[in-house]
Image (cartoon, helix red, strand yellow):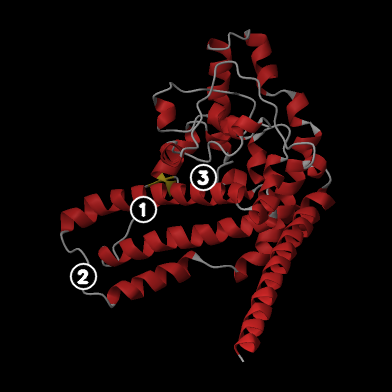
Amino acid sequence: MDQIYNIFEFVTSNFLDPKKRVFLGYLFSGFLIAFLWVLFVKKVPLKKSLGYIFDKRIYFAKSAISDYFLYAINLFVMIIFSPILLSQLTIATIIFEFLHTQEFVTPIENFFILSAIIPVAFTLCYFILDDFSKFLIHMLMHKIPILWCFHKVHHSAEVLTPITVFRTHPVEGFIFVVRNAITQGAVIGLFYFISNGNLNLVTVLGANLFSFCFHLLGSNLRHSHINISYWRWLEHFLISPAQHQVHHSIKKIHHDKNFGVTFAFWDLIFGSLVFSKNNQKIKYGLNEKENHIRYNLFQIYLYPIWESMNILFTLLKKNILRIFNIFNLTIFKFKKGF
């Protein structure tokens, strides 16, 4: 019984941690926002509102059930491999030690700046740079074929639920762990140095203040069928749930759009921003050539590896042939010179 309890506690840990996106408090606030939106904007009758939000055709769809299994399996995979991955502490230490060797930057000693400005600046920079790095890696996963092999596992979802955020291949998970270590470690190392070790993050329930607000205001609705749009001017700055749902669209015109997690201006700068439309109907998933990895867990985990290896071998083969041809041409010219 103790082993069963420990496994249950481990699998449900993310739901009890305010630092995690699927913390029960965030899920509750998201569903409350959804309820008010369905009731007052969509004009769905009160008796039907809960049925609309908790639609069993979505939460018990084959795609959603695959999400639940992937969530549990990936938790165990990350626990096994996380000790050998790059850590925040390593990067923060490298940055901190490097800055100690430089003369152009020195720690701040002003008490007001250290106590009032630095904590807010650190918390804000931490949040903004973390969000930009997520945007950048997300965009690269769509643009680079080898990375797309793994990221398309996430896009194979045919329905969206808050657990769909965990529908990822472990390789993508490893990439984001390294991203997290580099970005957050660099910010921690920099601010730890300039604050002379007096560093504090502005938090609510242990979570970054800005992350807390982002999740409390419905971040989980981005992976849902609740297509809440913002005002057009606001969708220039913040990604709405409906905008992220556009990102999951199977339509070709929506491919490689709205990579942002929190902020929309990254997409605006890189030319990938698309606005939501009222009453838009979106079909989610992959095209017919790629949708074979929808439900089969064996294929979800192994096919991306096989496909990426094929791409890698093809690239190596082309480059080896190119090098071989250059070598032969060089030898031919050398012999001709004699």
Q: Quick one: SS at disc 3?
A: loop
Observer-side mark, 2 or 3, equals: 2
Answer yes or no: is residue 1 visible. Answer: no
User: Residue 201 got which mark?
Assistant: 1
Q: Earlier in the sequence, mark 2 or mark 3?
A: 3
Q: Quick check: 140 left or right of 182?
A: right
Q: Quick one: SS at disc 1?
A: loop
Q: Residue at x 35, y 51 (%)?
A: 125
Q: Residues within 10 Å of mark 2 (few under 14, many from 20)?
A: few
Answer yes or no: is residue 99 visible. Answer: yes
**According to the image, label 2 marks what residue?**
104
Observer-side mark, 2 or 1, equals: 2
User: Residue 189 got which mark?
Assistant: none
170 up-or-down from 318: above or below: above
Q: Earlier in the sequence, mark 3 or mark 1?
A: 3
The residue under label 1 is which amino acid type? Leu
244 up-or-down from 182: above or below: above
Residue 165 position in % (x across, y down): 63, 42
**According to the image, label 3 marks what residue?**
18
Residue 42 position in % (x across, y down): 58, 12
Mark 2 vs mark 3, CA separation in Å: 38 Å
Mark 2 vs mark 1, CA separation in Å: 25 Å
